[in-house]
């Protein structure tokens, strides 16, 4: 059956689990002497690697395989949660034929699925950078499993007397510290840039190019398109830089508790970055429109465009370099279920 499936979808053989091992490696991996006879079945291997198609095919053809367990008494549900494969867990939840005992099973240490969801392992399979975003995905995984079942469904204590919340707090201490440091440094650097832009924007917004008409107080260049662009962009730069500074200062003064990484801190960082990018673009527009009046008439349309393009190029590179972080924040905030925990490589 596996051979037929690989003939249909050969790319599945390239998928890696959290330990960077593919299906062939796990199948023929050398076992220790005490592990002989306790190997994992194809269903358990597919669940660990997150291959939804193979798990579904095996359960359709051999429903009794749902009761398979490894040497640690972990079934397909526990292995999917332990290896951060939420899509496998969702697939099993959708199968109405499965009994509650499958989801209520515990391993030889008394850990339920919620205990394993609260454990932060050695590997970091979430394909997202930064300790803060890693922490956010960990919280999403824990709440995803917790909210999938009624209250008090899972076993509360394992054999060590630990609750899932105790395990989550204990195993994520270093990640919370790393995420706090990353957020603090990022917010501190961005707040300095926002403060500088705010200072420049305030100075430019209060300065009228060309002066004003005596006795009237009306700007000399009033009505010209470049002057209107200068006025509007200066105001936008001032407002957006102040907004960005407020958001970054609110991050710096946060408590950095575990629950803050779920939504509070990312929701502050996202509009802060957005406001910062807006202020940078606006202050550049203000500079270019204000400098447009300095050039002579015969040079305005010949030299202005390449000069302004060269001025905006470094800032554009910086913005494009930060776009992945911006999109990762959007993805992490609005996605309720954690992403798949593997990546595909080409041989």
Image (tube, grey):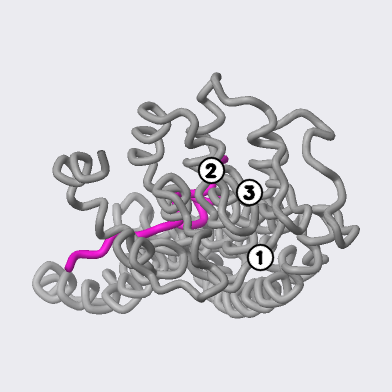
User: Who is closer to the viewer here, 190 or 236?
Assistant: 190
Q: Which of marks 1 and 2 is nearer the N terminus?
A: 2
Q: In which quarter of the image is the C terminus?
A: bottom left
Q: Distance between the residues labelled 3 and 1?
A: 13 Å
> Badges 3 and 1: C-beta atoms under 8 Å apart?
no
Question: Would residue 195 be found to the left or right of residue 157 on screen?
Answer: left
Q: Is residue 85 left or right of residue 157?
A: left
Q: Residue 203: image x %, image y %?
A: 55, 73
Instruction: Kindly identify the residue that appears in the image at 59 percent across and 55 percent down.
Output: 82
User: Which comes sooner in the sequence, label 2 or label 3?
Assistant: 2
- Please state the horizontal and vertical placement of residue 267, each as a whole percent of the image: 63, 52
Q: Quadrant of residue 295?
A: bottom left
Note whether residue 254 is visible.
no
Q: Name the quarter where the N terminus is drawn.
A: top left
Q: What SS does tag 1 mark?
A: loop
Assess whether residue 343 is covered by the magenta stretch. Answer: yes
Residue contact at pointers 1 and 2, CB within 8 angstroms: no
Front label number (2 vs 3): 2
Looking at the image, which is closer to me, 308 or 10? 10
The residue beneath circle 1 is 120
Near mark 1 (Cα within 10 A), the count class, few <14, some 14-19 or many ≥20, is many
Check the image and report above or below for 167 versus 52: below
Q: Position of residue 196 (x, y in %)?
A: 57, 78
| Disc with the residue nearer the chain's start (3 vs 1) | 1
Q: Which residue is drawn at 33% across and 38% down?
A: 53
Q: Tell me the magenta residue range.
A: 327-347
- Viewer-proximal residue, 316 or 39? 39
227 relative to 43, above or below? below
- Residue that numbered label 2 is attached to: 68
Q: How far apart are marks 1 and 2 (CA)?
A: 25 Å
């Amino acid at each position: 059956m596996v051979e037929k499936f690989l003939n249909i979808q050969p790319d599945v053989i390239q998928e890696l689990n959290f330990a960077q091992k593919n299906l062939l490696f796990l199948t023929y991996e050398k076992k220790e002497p005490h592990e002989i006879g306790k190997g994992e079945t194809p269903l358990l291997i597919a669940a660990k690697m997150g291959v939804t198609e193979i798990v579904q095919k095996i359960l359709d053809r051999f429903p009794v395989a749902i009761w398979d367990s490894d040497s640690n008494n972990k079934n397909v549900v526990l292995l999917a949660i332990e290896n951060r494969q939420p899509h496998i867990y969702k697939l099993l939840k959708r199968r109405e034929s499965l009994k509650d005992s499958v989801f209520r099973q515990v391993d030889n240490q008394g850990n339920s699925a919620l205990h394993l969801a609260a454990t932060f392992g050695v590997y970091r399979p979430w394909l997202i950078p930064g300790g803060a975003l890693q922490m956010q995905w960990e919280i999403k995984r824990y709440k995803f499993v917790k909210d999938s079942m009624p209250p008090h469904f899972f076993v509360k204590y394992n054999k060590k007397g630990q609750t899932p919340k105790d395990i989550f707090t204990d195993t994520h201490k270093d990640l919370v510290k790393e995420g706090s440091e990353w957020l603090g440094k990022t917010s501190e650097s961005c707040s300095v840039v926002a403060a500088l832009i705010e200072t420049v924007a305030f100075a430019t917004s209060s300065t009228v190019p060309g002066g004003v008409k005596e006795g009237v107080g009306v700007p000399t260049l009033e009505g010209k398109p470049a002057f209107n662009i200068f006025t509007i962009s200066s105001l936008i730069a001032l407002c957006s830089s102040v907004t960005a500074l407020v958001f970054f200062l609110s991050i710096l003064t946060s408590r950095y508790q575990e629950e803050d990484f779920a939504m509070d801190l990312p929701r502050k960082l996202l509009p802060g970055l957005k406001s910062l990018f807006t202020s940078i673009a606006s202050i550049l527009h203000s500079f270019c429109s204000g400098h447009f009046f300095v050039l002579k008439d015969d040079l305005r349309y010949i030299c202005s465009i390449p000069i302004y393009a060269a001025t905006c190029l470094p800032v554009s590179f910086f913005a494009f370099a930060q776009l992945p972080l911006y999109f990762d924040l959007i993805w992490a905030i609005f996605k309720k279920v954690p992403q798949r925990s593997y990546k595909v490589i080409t041989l």
